Image (cartoon, helix red, strand yellow):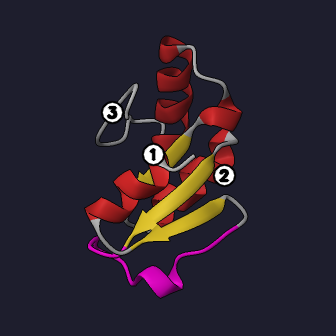
Amino acid sequence: LFDGFACGASMFGKAQHVRRLLKALKVAHAQAVLIGDESRDVDAASTAGIHAAVVRWGYADIDALGGDALIARFDTPQDVVATLTAG
C-alpha cells in the first residue's frame, strides 16, 4: 500500500522533507497523501503541494485539524487501509 515512509522533520521543515521523498520515489504530487496527526502535518502537505489526511489517534484534536490540503480524517488504522485500497 505504501511506496515510501518517513518520520520526523528535517532542519528545514516537513514540507522540504516531503518534496525530497517524492522526488526520490518519483511520485507525482497529485498521487501523494501525507497522513499525520497534527496541524504541522497538514501545513506541510499544503506547502509541499500534496493532499493531507489526519488520524484520530494522534496528538491533536482531529476536529481542530483542517485546511485546503485535507482530504480525509481517519478514526482507525483500518480506515486508512480501507480508504487506500478502495477503488
Q: Secondary structure at mark 3?
A: loop
Q: Is residue 52 above or below residue 4?
A: below
Q: Which residues are magenta?
A: 56-67
Task: Name the kind of residue labelled 3 in the image.
Answer: Phe
Q: Nearer the viewer, residue 67 or 40?
A: 67
Magenta: predominant secondary structure element?
loop
Spatial CA span between label 1 and label 2: 23 Å
Residue that label 3 marks: 5
Which picture quadrant has residue 43?
bottom right
Residue that label 2 marks: 46
Residue beneath the point at 49% across and 86% down: 63
Q: Position of residue 14 (x, y in %)?
A: 47, 43
Mark earlier in primary sequence (3, 1): 3
Q: Position of residue 65 (x, y in %)?
A: 52, 76
Spatial CA span between label 3 and label 1: 17 Å
- Count up the numbered dots: 3
- Apparent side of residue 79 relative to residue 73 in the rendered image (left or right): left
Residue that label 1 marks: 85
Of badges 3 and 2, nearer the viewer stands 3
- Apparent side of residue 10 relative to residue 14 in the rendered image (left or right): left
Task: Name the kind of residue labelled 1 in the image.
Answer: Thr
Question: Could you tell me if the residues under marks 3 and 2 are in contact, i.e. CB atoms within 8 Å?
Answer: no
- Apparent side of residue 62 relative to residue 42 in the rendered image (left or right): left
